[in-house]
Image: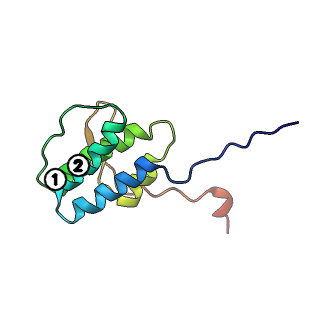
Amino acid sequence: INMVRVGCPVLEIPEMYYIKAEYIAEQGEFEQALATLKIVKNNRNITSAMPSVSDYESFMELLLTDQIRDNLTRGNSFFYLKKLNWSKRYGLGGKWEAVPEGWYVLPIPESESMF
């Protein structure tokens, strides 16, 4: 019997571009960060113009919207937002909403809290 091995990617190329764009935006280089994000969009055949941003938070909302769309079925968005300790979440209406206190803290399972 021939078995096919299917690998599970640990880190994908678009994710590396998101991390790079995030780092560049932290340095205040928003035009360069937008150009990095545009590379991912171009490879997805998204040719719409990039909006201009002038601060870190507005750039990150743009980046996170794309990142959430990119990881929609993989469940990685929660962990990316948790890593950032981002104070907002993308709501059902397509708008950013404030997260409640402790949103990114998972409860301890009862089987581990009995002691």
Residue 63 seen anywhere in this rendered image of the structure: yes
Judge the density around disc 2: few (<14), some (14-19), many (≥20) Cα neighbours within 10 Å: few
Measured as percent of width and height from the top left, residue 88 is found at 29, 49
Q: Quadrant of residue 39?
A: top left
In the picture, the disc for residue 31 is: 1
- Position of the C terminus, as image quadrant, is bottom right
Secondary structure type for disc 2: helix
Query: In this picture, is 95 found above or below 115?
Result: above
Residue position marked by numbered label 2 in the rendering: 35
Report the residue at 80% width, 39% height from top: 3
Residue sitting at the far right: 1
Amino acid carrying label 1: it is Glu
Frontmost residue, 10 versus 98: 10
What label does residue 5 carry, if any? none
Question: Considering depth in this image, is 42 or 64 the residue closer to the camera?
Answer: 42
Q: Image quarter for residue 95?
A: top left
Amino acid type, callout 2: Ala
> Residue 56 at x, y = what percent?
19, 57
Left/right of residue 22 with respect to residue 76 in the rendered view: left
- Residue at image coords 45%, 53%: 79
Q: Is residue 84 above or below residue 37?
A: below
Counting from the top left corner in percent of width and height, residue 86 is at 32, 55
Distance from Cα at disc 1 to Cα at disc 2: 6 Å
Graded by Cα atoms within 10 Å as few (under 14), some (14 to 19) or many (20 or more), the crowding at tag 1 reads some
Does the residue at mark 1 contact the one at mark 2 (Cβ under 8 Å)?
A: yes
Left/right placement of residue 78 relative to residue 7 reads left
Q: Quadrant of residue 28?
A: bottom left
| Residue at x 11% of width, y 53% of height | 54
